[in-house]
Image: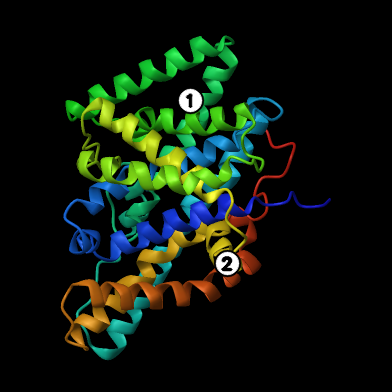
């Protein structure tokens, strides 16, 4: 069976998101070295755009069991795999430290289950997004099945996001990122709506996207406040949605006419693998430059570590997609016919 043709500008958008995420994790202050409010402005779309892209590809498939099977294959199986992989690498590091007489590190097996009951955890904390994305898919599937009128679907989305916002504002945390999923639902629905409008195909109006992005960039920069979906640190309700919606739609519009850029599209296509492995790769690289190279945190260190991390990721992507395709959403782990119960 022929593979569906990929949309180059979608892969580019995913590449942009994951590269910004990697740079942010290398040094949380990196973007603020460049401009005082730049990190807040980037947060307006950096993760929301991932939900948006996922919403574009939402389908009901063949019922709840088939839908869930696909989401387990594409989201939860990679989640568990990357947690286990990180722990395995930690065991290797423990063995290496033991052989050279260095200070040991914690290898308590409880590290493996921390992601299932903690908000943040060791080594693979960026994987919180996968838990949240899984629940967003399940919530929207339920809304699609239960509510038929479009206006009812949109009202339900707003209501759920408002409850999630209230939970975040009152520091009420739900397990497995459910509260964050409620807040993120509108970004996902925006992507679903864009596909519904039929604007994914090239249009003569696409050439105006870059101009629109240039016009909205400054307002987004100056109006954005700190936002952290993971920890539910949220700005004013309107800023939580209006600014990301404007930023996402402008970027979507601006990216549509871009030609296919093979290297960037490759990173975008396998952004899931990058999400799951980048922390275990850049941490030793950054530590070496700080401890052995005597470098201080700053623009130079971040750019060097980022470049080396992305370089190392190229063979890592090849290895995992070639030898662990069922664990990295390249092939289904559970085949068709799998039953939920």
How far from the left and from the top, in percent, is residue 16? 45, 57
Quarter-of-image position of residue 284: bottom left
- Residue at the image position 40 percent from the left and 65 percent from the top: 278
Residue 198 bears which disc, if any? Answer: none
* Residue 125 vs residue 269, the one in the foreground: 269
Q: Is residue 198 left or right of residue 278?
A: right
**Can you see residue 253?**
yes
What percent of the width, then of the height, locates residue 312? 46, 77
Please say if 160 is above or below 178. Answer: above
Nearest the viewer among 170 and 192 is: 192
Q: For mark 1, does the 10 Å Cα neighbourhood hold few (<14), some (14 to 19), or many (20 or more) residues?
A: some
Q: Position of residue 92 (x, y in %)?
A: 39, 76
Q: Secondary structure at mark 2?
A: helix
- In this rendering, the answer to whether 334 lies above or below 32 is above
Crowding at mark 2 (Cα within 10 Å: few <14, some 14-19, many 20+): some
Compute the Cα span from label 1 to label 2. 30 Å
Q: Which residue lies at the image location 63% right of the left edge and 68% below the top edge?
A: 323
- The residue shown at (82%, 52%) is 2
Q: Is residue 177 above or below residue 114?
A: above
Q: Earlier in the sequence, mark 1 or mark 2?
A: 1
Where residue 28 sits: x, y (%)?
22, 59
Residue 261 lies in quadrant: bottom right
Residue that badge 2 annotates: 320
**Seen from this angle, which residue lies furthest right?**
1
Residue 173 horizontal side relative to residue 215, left or right: left
Which residue matches tag 1? 139
Residue in the foreground of this view, choosing between 126 and 210 = 210
């Amino acid at each position: 069976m022929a593979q569906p043709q990929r949309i180059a500008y979608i892969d580019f958008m995913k590449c942009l998101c994951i590269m910004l995420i990697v740079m942010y994790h290398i040094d949380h202050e990196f973007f603020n070295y460049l401009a005082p409010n730049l990190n807040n402005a980037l947060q307006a779309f950096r993760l929301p755009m991932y939900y948006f892209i996922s919403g574009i590809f939402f389908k009901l498939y063949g019922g709840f069991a088939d839908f869930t099977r696909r989401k387990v294959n594409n989201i939860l199986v990679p989640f568990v795999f990357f947690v286990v992989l990180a722990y395995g690498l930690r065991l290797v590091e423990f063995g290496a430290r033991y052989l050279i007489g260095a200070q040991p590190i914690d290898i308590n097996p409880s590290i493996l289950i921390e992601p299932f009951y903690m908000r943040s955890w060791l080594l693979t904390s960026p994987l919180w997004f996968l838990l949240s994305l899984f629940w967003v898919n399940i919530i929207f599937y339920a809304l699609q099945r239960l509510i038929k009128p479009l206006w009812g679907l949109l009202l339900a989305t707003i209501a759920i996001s408002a409850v999630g916002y209230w939970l975040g504002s009152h520091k009420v945390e739900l397990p497995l990122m459910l509260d964050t999923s409620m807040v993120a639902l509108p970004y996902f629905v925006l992507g679903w709506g864009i596909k519904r409008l039929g604007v994914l195909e090239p249009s003569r109006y696409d050439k105006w996207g870059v101009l629109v992005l240039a016009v909205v960039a400054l307002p987004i920069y100056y109006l954005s406040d700190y936002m952290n979906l993971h920890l539910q640190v949220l700005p004013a309700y309107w800023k939580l949605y209006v600014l990301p919606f404007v930023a996402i739609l402008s970027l979507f519009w601006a990216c549509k006419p871009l030609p296919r850029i093979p290297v960037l599209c490759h990173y975008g296509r396998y952004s899931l693998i990058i999400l799951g492995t980048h922390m275990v790769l850049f941490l030793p690289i950054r530590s070496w430059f700080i401890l052995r190279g005597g470098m201080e945190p700053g623009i130079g260190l971040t750019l060097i570590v980022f470049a080396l991390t992305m370089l190392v990721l190229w063979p890592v992507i090849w290895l995992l997609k070639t030898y662990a395709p069922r664990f990295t959403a390249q092939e289904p782990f559970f085949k068709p016919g799998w039953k939920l119960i």
